[in-house]
Image (cartoon, rainbow, N blue to C red):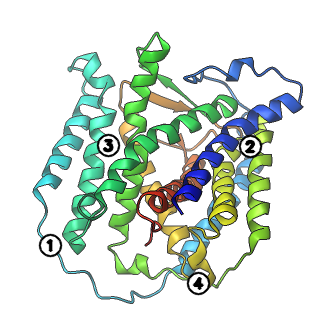
Amino acid sequence: MRARAAAVLTAAFALAWIAPLVGLLAAGESLAPFLGFPPRTEPVTHAPFSPAAFALLALPALGAVALFLISLRPAQAPPAPRSSFPRWGWIGLALMAAGWVAAWNDVLPVEWRRQAFTPLWVGYALLMCALAYRRGGRSLLTHRTGWFVALFPVSAAFWWLFEHLNQFADNWSYEGIEAPGSWEYFLQGTLPFSTVLPAVAATLFWLREYPRLEALRLPPMRGGPALGWLALLAGALVLAALGPWPEAFFWSLWVGPLLLLGGLQKLILGQTLFAPLATGDARSLLQPALAALVCGFFWELWNFGALAKWHYSIPFAQRFHLFEMPLLGYAGYLPFGIVCALVMDTLARLLERRGLYG
């Protein structure tokens, strides 16, 4: 199990990294601008807003909302007994508050403001763990400690993959970062990137303490090995298309890794995060998407007034902003949350010999 789980993560990372380069090579374009590390993205102006394209791109998001509403059922379990709020939860709250103040405060030294993202999101993850502990007496920090801690280094590598893919899509760029050398830029990026998966994981397990969200049901959905091959091929193709045709395939940055990881889990592990869908249990599909959307709201909120921050440029949809993010851009958090869950599930099989929901 452990060797196969490691193979899934390694193969998914390698395929996602290489696929856009293969697409460029097939189109006869130069690879040189995309081979450096760490990847840096400059601001790019994309195709202007298009009402027709906006409506078309909104359909999957509306479908996801409908799917979630259809899946809601009455709670099948009584509310969990409450525990006392743990002392380390107050540490998380203090870190989060201090990070927010540092990020938005023009009076503080510039270097403090640039480094605010990491303590803010470490604090957020601790606070979510504390809220889960208060509701149900369990949390990732206290009951799955090794796996939770391992998410930090895995998260850093995970988000560097998305920085690589963003070189092709150019959907976001950074400002307020003072890092002239590659090593300085790598260090400044790696620390905050390490908080992404822990934040989503802590939010997911907090949401799981609400009985209504533990009763999500859909009609049974089954798929054999052929579905694994189909997902793997589709993921590779849409990421390959991202290289030469970023305006049309910018969305594959989020969907491609999901398909690759899901397909590889099915083919190499013989089981996937989505196995419960065969019995109608929709938690593994919908809960991570919701968790990432919750995190996404706070990522964009805290980014809005920060010194070191990111800006978006999304083809056809650059309108109706909530903070820096165009409204339709929040739809990207839905597949992103599922990608996060697939990584977390595979890592759990590697370290604990059980899945994310085990």
What residue is rendered at 77% in x and 50% in y? 52
How would you rate the neighbour count of disc 3 (Cα within 10 Å): few for under 14, some for 14-19, many for 20 or more? Answer: many
The answer to whether residue 244 of the structure is visible from this angle is no
User: Picture coordinates of residue 355 (x, y %)?
Assistant: 47, 67
Mark 1: which amino acid? Answer: Ser
Q: Work out how far the residue at label 4 is from the one at label 2, CA to CA, in angstroms.
A: 30 Å
- Which residue is label 2 attached to? 239
- Which residue is label 3 attached to? 121
Mark 4: which amino acid? Answer: Gly
User: Picture coordinates of residue 356 (x, y %)?
Assistant: 45, 66
Dot 2 lies on which element? helix
Q: Work out how far the residue at label 4 is from the one at label 3, CA to CA, in angstroms.
A: 34 Å
Q: Earlier in the sequence, mark 1 or mark 2?
A: 1
What residue is rendered at 54% in x and 50% in y? 330
Marks 4 and 3 close (CB-CB < 8 Å): no
Disc ID at residue 3: none
* Image vertical order of residue 72 relative to residue 9, above or below: below
Q: Earlier in the sequence, mark 3 or mark 1?
A: 1
Dot 1 lies on which element? loop
How would you rate the neighbour count of disc 2 (Cα within 10 Å): few for under 14, some for 14-19, many for 20 or more? Answer: many
Q: Work out how far the residue at label 2 is from the one at label 3, CA to CA, in angstroms.
A: 29 Å
User: Picture coordinates of residue 297 (x, y %)?
Assistant: 42, 50
Marks 2 and 3 close (CB-CB < 8 Å): no
User: Picture coordinates of residue 93 (x, y %)?
Assistant: 19, 48
Could you tell whether 142 is left or right of 59 in the image?
left
- Which residue is label 4 attached to? 280
Dot 4 lies on which element? loop
Q: Work out how far the residue at label 1 is from the one at label 2, CA to CA, in angstroms.
A: 46 Å
